[in-house]
C-alpha cells in the first residue's frame, strides 16, 4: 500500500472561513510528495453559514482526494466520530480548522509508525499560535505517557484499530473529549510513540473551545475521575 493510500485526514469545521484555507493548505503541503494517489481528506462541516465551504472547494486542485460531509449531529467530538466512520484508510489524522500541520507532519509520523508496528499512534510536538500566526507559547512539554492533557488528535497519527478497540470520542464532552479518548486509548493500548519534531501549530482565538479555561478544567476533573475508576478496575 502506498503512503497516500494509508491515510485518511479529517478536518472538522464550523464557520471557519478565516482559517480553513490555511489549515487545508498545510494539509496539502504535508501530503506533497507522498507516493501513490492522493490521500482521502474528509472535511466534515457542522453547518457553516460563512464561506468555509467555498474556501474548501477552492482547494480541490491541491487536494484531489477532498470529500465534504455535512454533519448530522452537533459538536466537535460527534463530527470526528462521523468522519472516522466514513473514512477508509488504516491510519487516521486530524487537522482542526484553526490549526496547521507542519510540512513534515505526515512523513515524520509515518516513519515512526513503520519503525514501531506495535504502537497505536505516533505524536509530535505542538506549538500554540494565535489565528494570525504569532507564537503565543512554547512547544508543549513532552511526556512519554498518557498523563499529559496537551496531547491532541491534531498532533497524532492514529491506527484505525485503536478506534475499533477503544470506541468513539465521547460526544457528551464539549471540550475534553480529546483528552478523554487519548487517556482511554493509553490505558487500553499503552502510551503513544512521541517524536521530538514539531508537527502541529494549534490555533487559539478568543471564544474558541480551547480558551474556555473554566469549562476545560471542569471536564478534565470528570475525565480524571473516570481515569482513576478505570485504573482501579484494571484499565477496563
Image (spheres, grey):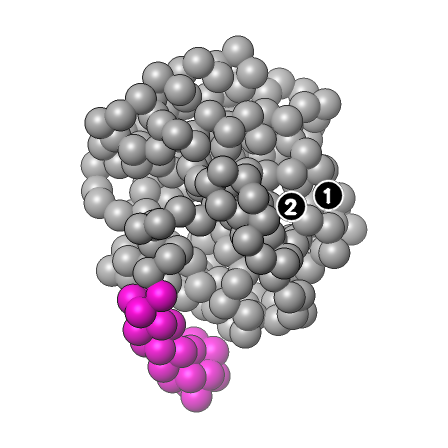
Left or right of 27, for residue 34: right
Q: Quarter-wise, where is residue 223 in the image?
A: bottom left
Say the numbered circle drawn on residue 108: 1
Q: Residue at x 53, y 47 (%)?
A: 129
Q: Residues within 10 Å of mark 2 (few under 14, many from 20)?
A: many
Q: Residue at x 21, y 42 (%)?
A: 73
Magenta stretch, main secondary structure class: helix
Q: How many marks?
A: 2
Q: N-terminal of the two: label 1 or label 2?
A: 1
Say the numbered circle drawn on residue 45: none
Q: Residue at x 55, y 53 (%)?
A: 136
In this view, which residue lies farthest toward the right? 115
Q: Is residue 26 visible?
A: yes
Quarter occupied by the C terminus: bottom left
Q: Quarter-wise, where is residue 138 in the image?
A: bottom right
Q: Secondary structure at mark 2?
A: strand
In this view, which residue lies farthest toward the top? 61
Left or right of 200, for residue 116: right
Q: Residues within 10 Å of mark 1 (few under 14, many from 20)?
A: many
Q: Which residues are magenta?
A: 213-236
Residue, disc 2: 199
Q: Secondary structure at mark 1?
A: helix
Circles 1 and 2, Cβ within 8 Å, touching? The answer is yes
Q: Which residue occupies the foreground of this view, 94 or 120?
A: 94
Q: Which residue occupies the foreground of this view, 99 or 42?
A: 99
Quarter occupied by the N terminus: top right
Amino acid at each position: 500500500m502506498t503512503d497516500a493510500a494509508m491515510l485518511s485526514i479529517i478536518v472538522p469545521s464550523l464557520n471557519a472561513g478565516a482559517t480553513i484555507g490555511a489549515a487545508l493548505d498545510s494539509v496539502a503541503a504535508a501530503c506533497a510528495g507522498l507516493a501513490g494517489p492522493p490521500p482521502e481528506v474528509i472535511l466534515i462541516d457542522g453547518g457553516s453559514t460563512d464561506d468555509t465551504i467555498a474556501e474548501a472547494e477552492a482547494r480541490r486542485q491541491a487536494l484531489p482526494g477532498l470529500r465534504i460531509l455535512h454533519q448530522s449531529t452537533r459538536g466537535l467530538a460527534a463530527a470526528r466520530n462521523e468522519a472516522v466512520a466514513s473514512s477508509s484508510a488504516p491510519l487516521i489524522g486530524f487537522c482542526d480548522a484553526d490549526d496547521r500541520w507542519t510540512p513534515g507532519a505526515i512523513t515524520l509520523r509515518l516513519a515512526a509508525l513503520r519503525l514501531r508496528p506495535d504502537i497505536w499512534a505516533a505524536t509530535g510536538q505542538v506549538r500554540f499560535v494565535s489565528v494570525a500566526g504569532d507564537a503565543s507559547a512554547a512547544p508543549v512539554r513532552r511526556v512519554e505517557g498518557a498523563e499529559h492533557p496537551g496531547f491532541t488528535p491534531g498532533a497524532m497519527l492514529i491506527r484505525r484499530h485503536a478506534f475499533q478497540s477503544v470506541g468513539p470520542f465521547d460526544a457528551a464532552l464539549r471540550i475534553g473529549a480529546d483528552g478523554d479518548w487519548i487517556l482511554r486509548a493509553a490505558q487500553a493500548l499503552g502510551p503513544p510513540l512521541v517524536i521530538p519534531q514539531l508537527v502541529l501549530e494549534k490555533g487559539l482565538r478568543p471564544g474558541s473551545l480551547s480558551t474556555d479555561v473554566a469549562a476545560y478544567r471542569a471536564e478534565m476533573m470528570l475525565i480524571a475521575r473516570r481515569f482513576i475508576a478505570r485504573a482501579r478496575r484494571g484499565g477496563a
